[in-house]
Image (cartoon, coloured by chain):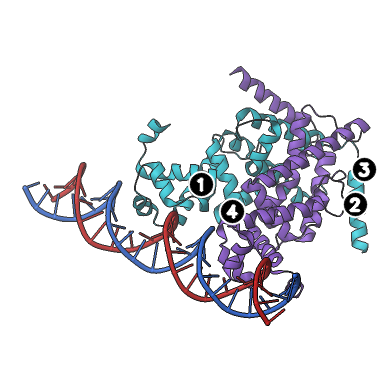
Chain colours: A cyan, B purple, C red, D blue
DNA sequence: CAGTATGCTAACCAAATGGTCAGCCCTGAG
DNA sequence: CTCAGGGCTGACCATTTGGTTAGCATACTG
């Protein structure tokens, strides 16, 4: 890993280091000096290349997003981004989770983009009959995407619940993606009683 | 709101203010001085009551968790915590989302507790026939809980996708919970082809 | 009344942070 | 060779941060 890094320009090395640290600790818990020292450069060089800390963060955002966008398969359709997320390295995934949570404009744009693509994909599926019709397609799409991305944010807890040591362990990821597809395919509830109950609650709320 | 706060002890007022700010901005982006000034006290008083910033954070954790645990209905079963989350105020929800993301020990314990309760509930449902049988019950439970909590972390993006202005708008929450229950009840996919495709991919991966 | 705990504050402190600046070193062009 | 420009650094700076301390006021208790 370090030997591979040696080939990179200092600028790229700094960005990669920042990506890693930001993803692991959160942007504002990581100082420029920490990034610099871990990248083996002076902290002034970081500013020299990225002007401000915000500039560095944005560079990370752009890099990660380009990785996700221009992934192996150009088409976001198929499994709607999930594959790209799966393929991305652990550091990138961690960073993405933070970015969505911190609500940077770049992350928001990416989210919206994924929602839009997924919306089209689901709609297409409805037309072709392999996706259920929804009573609120827009909400369903948004929630579907949120759920796909949820493990990025809850990875730590998820892995603990599965009894896996490493948060972004590949085996664990495969396991819960499988569980997710199972839910998306067969649902969780075997009959409509929860749905009915919920509708009753809402009706009562409306009457109140 | 402010008039209601006037009745509280300064200690409680500080905690509530911190809860609000921490939830909105993230713990480490909020200074003790910011909390103090917003609560209308000196920053030294904050330390006087909570000793350290970490102490304040822990007090917030404990408070929020006790709110969630000892909610209206003592039994976490039914809708498995979702109701409690719905009933909790926006500030509390925001804070909870941050807490899960920051991975504090208290949040982790709460998560595990919810997973356990939900696991029992789903198992019971399987026994009684109103919950689908799963091929990996543990993974399903973990994912189910993660998905229930996901809106806490992705609220901002979710509301944007729904075209709602306020992140924790009640109407929006009702709308996507309904969409969620719809998915849990009927699934998303109308046939098993995605599941089958996924299994094929994994088999190929295993062969590799 | 004396004494003492408690809520509270102003002033202060050391450390760390993001950012600036002057200048070194090295390569590549004239 | 010269010299210009980019990569890179050490030293410096203002600001903010979490945390400490001494002390004030008020209220309860003997």
The image shows a total of numbered marks equal to 4
Where does residue B38 sit, x and y in percent of width and height? 62, 70
Q: Chain of mark 3?
A: A
Observer-nearest residue: A179 or A130? A179
Observer-nearest residue: A141 or D20? D20
Q: Circle 1 sits in a helix, a strand or a loop, which is it?
A: helix
Looking at the image, tell me whether mark 2 or mark 1 is earlier in sequence order: 1
Closer to viewer: mark 2 or mark 1: 1
Where does residue B167 sit, x and y in percent of width and height? 70, 59
Residue placed under numbered mark 4 in the picture: A102
The image quarter in which residue C19 lies: bottom left
Residue placed under numbered mark 1 in the picture: A22
Local packing at callout 3 (Cα closer than 10 Å; few below 14, some 14-19, many 20+) is: few
Q: Which numbered circle lies on residue A193?
A: 3
For the N terminus of chain B, which image quadrant?
Answer: bottom right
Where does residue B204 sit, x and y in percent of width and height? 63, 21
């Amino acid at each position: 890993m370090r030997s591979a890094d040696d080939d990179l320009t200092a600028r790229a090395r700094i960005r990669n280091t920042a990506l890693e640290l930001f993803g692991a600790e959160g942007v504002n818990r990581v100082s420029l000096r920490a990034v610099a020292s871990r990248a083996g450069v002076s902290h002034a060089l970081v500013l020299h290349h990225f002007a401000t800390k915000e500039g560095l963060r944005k560079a990370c955002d752009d890099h990660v997003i380009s990785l996700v966008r221009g992934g192996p398969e150009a088409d976001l359709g198929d499994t709607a981004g999930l594959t790209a997320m799966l393929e991305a390295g652990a550091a990138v995934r961690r960073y993405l989770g933070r970015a969505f949570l911190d609500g940077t404009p770049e992350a928001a744009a990416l989210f919206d983009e994924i929602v839009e693509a997924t919306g089209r994909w689901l709609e297409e599926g409805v037309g072709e009959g392999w996706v259920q019709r929804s009573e609120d397609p827009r909400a369903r799409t948004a929630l579907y995407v949120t759920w796909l991305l949820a493990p990025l944010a809850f990875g730590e807890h998820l892995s603990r619940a599965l009894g896996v040591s490493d948060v972004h362990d590949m085996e664990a990821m495969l396991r819960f993606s499988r569980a997710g597809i199972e839910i998306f395919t067969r649902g969780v509830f075997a009959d409509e009683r929860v749905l009915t109950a919920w509708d009753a609650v809402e009706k009562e709320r409306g009457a109140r």
